[in-house]
Image (spheres, rainbow, N blue to C red):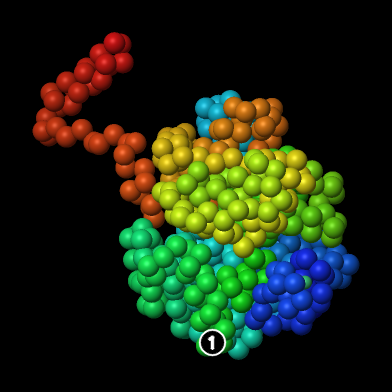
Amino acid sequence: MSSSFVRGLKCRLCGQAYPISATNFCTEDFGPLEVDYDYEAIADSINRAKIELRPFNMWRYQEFLPLDGEPTVGRQVGGTPLIKADRLARELGVEQLWIKNDAVNFPTLSFKDRVVAVALSKARELGLTTVGCASTGNLANSVAANAAAVGLESYILVPADLERSKILGTSVYGAKVIGIKGTYDEVNRLCTQIAFKYGWGFVNINLRPFYAEGSKTFGFEMAEQLGWRAPQHVVCPMAGGSLIGKIHKAFYELHRTGLLADKPECKFYGAQATGCNPISAAVKNGWDAHRPVRRPHTIAKSLAIGDPADGYFAAKVIRETGGWAEDASDAEIAEAMALLGRTEGIFAETAGGVTVAVARKLIEQGRLPRHEEIVLCITGNGLKTQDAVADCLEEPVVIAPSLEEFSGLLTEESSTVLV
Ligand SMILES: *Cc1c(COP(=O)(O)O)cnc(C)c1O
Ligand SMILES: [Zn+2]
């Protein structure tokens, strides 16, 4: 099944067309490039029944992805659960709540495996043998693992103050990990220079148009799992601001090709940490473009991008769909991680805490209606950011191996409850 559906690349600002290559910006206006498809041809070639017969992973929507041939990297990625979150719904005071859970995405437990599978498969089609990324953590894990699995050499550049578990979870795959004394935006700038000088494929820089398309599969799955329809409200964490726009694009594409009967009327809500909130600040203040945050400071390191590449487009999607954006403090993030754990049995990373905390705020503000259907995007796994939640959990009680002491403990507990 080769994808003859790609027309080329197209500038998101001026519409100028470019042939497929490892490039990400328009030479006229420096606007970002995106993949341009022939939707009529896609509509003619697939239908729901055909998709439903395929294995439940991200490649069942292959016609909407920019590869010439079969994927060669990350062939098992995607196919994560959509969960009806009734216990969390009761806590938050809403009626219909769902969680799309990419904390269990294969192989590196975040939604980044989706974007990397596409970017690295494309890198190989383009004949590249060395790849890399600028990362806030999850992308590092994913590029390193997926590159290792097919024998690509990888260079991973991260801010030097990243969580230790995310650095170990990159080095273990044999990647060359380089800590940069600076912010993510400084790391990103350096990677742009390296990609240009050495001709390597940096997944979120010169391969970005292909990378970004992988995020759509999070939205395709969500719609199919809801019974081929879009939800009314989606709350999504934002770092570079790409995922939120791609879920929106996914619903649009499914409708355009006849896979969704009804026109999607989903409102999009962006979630950020207060310590790095360029996009939510832009939405709340009515700014057209975001203002970069120079020194991000938050426990949600995976979202700490001060100058987001797709910030403008994320704010636009939020505005145009009638959604909103909010941000949450570190304390609110940690508390929301614990809330998600004790209500739904899901241990999400700090980004998940951001999403749940922001959803709670938006519900309290009356921006998310209590009786309508809401999907929360959980994008990464809590085992990678354990320290973040440590302070708001109780230490285990330690007793002797004695039934008497255990019973004493229970009595103590019940009397505390009575007080
Ligand atoms: C990268 C990332 C995001 C946001 O992705 P963007 O597309 O850059 O906005 C959200 N959650 C987690 C866990 C991430 O690693
Ligand atoms: Zn342009």
Give above or below for 411 relative to 45: above
Q: Which quarter of the picture shows residue 170? A: bottom left
Q: Is residue 9 left or right of residue 364?
A: right
Question: Which of the image's four quarters has the C terminus?
Answer: top left
Q: Nearer the viewer, residue 380 or 409?
A: 380
Q: Is residue 6 left or right of residue 178?
A: right
Give above or below for 52 relative to 125: above
Q: Nearer the viewer, residue 83 or 291?
A: 291
Give above or below for 88 relative to 153: above
Q: Is residue 23 left or right of residue 416?
A: right
Q: Nearer the viewer, residue 373 or 202?
A: 202
Helix, strand or loop at label 1? It is helix
Q: Residue at x 77, y 76 (%)?
A: 28
Question: Which of the image's four quarters has the N terminus?
Answer: bottom right
The x, y position of residue 70, in whole percent, is: 66, 78
According to the picture, the residue beneath numbered tag 1 turns out to be 197
Query: Tag 1: residue type?
Result: Lys
Q: Residue at x 43, y 50 (%)?
A: 297
The x, y position of residue 220, in whole percent, is: 70, 56
- For the question of whether residue 184 can be seen, the reply is yes
- For the question of whether residue 82 can be seen, the reply is no
Crowd class of label 1 (few under 14; some 14 to 19; many from 20; radius 10 Å): few
Q: Nearer the viewer, residue 282 or 137?
A: 282
The x, y position of residue 187, in whole percent, is: 47, 69
Q: Residue at x 69, y 35 (%)?
A: 373
Q: Which quarter of the picture shows residue 72? A: bottom right
Q: Residue at x 13, y 23 (%)?
A: 404
Q: Quadrant of ligand 2?
A: bottom right
Q: What is the number of callouts on the image?
A: 1
Q: Is residue 196 left or right of residue 335?
A: right
The x, y position of residue 267, in whole percent, is: 73, 42
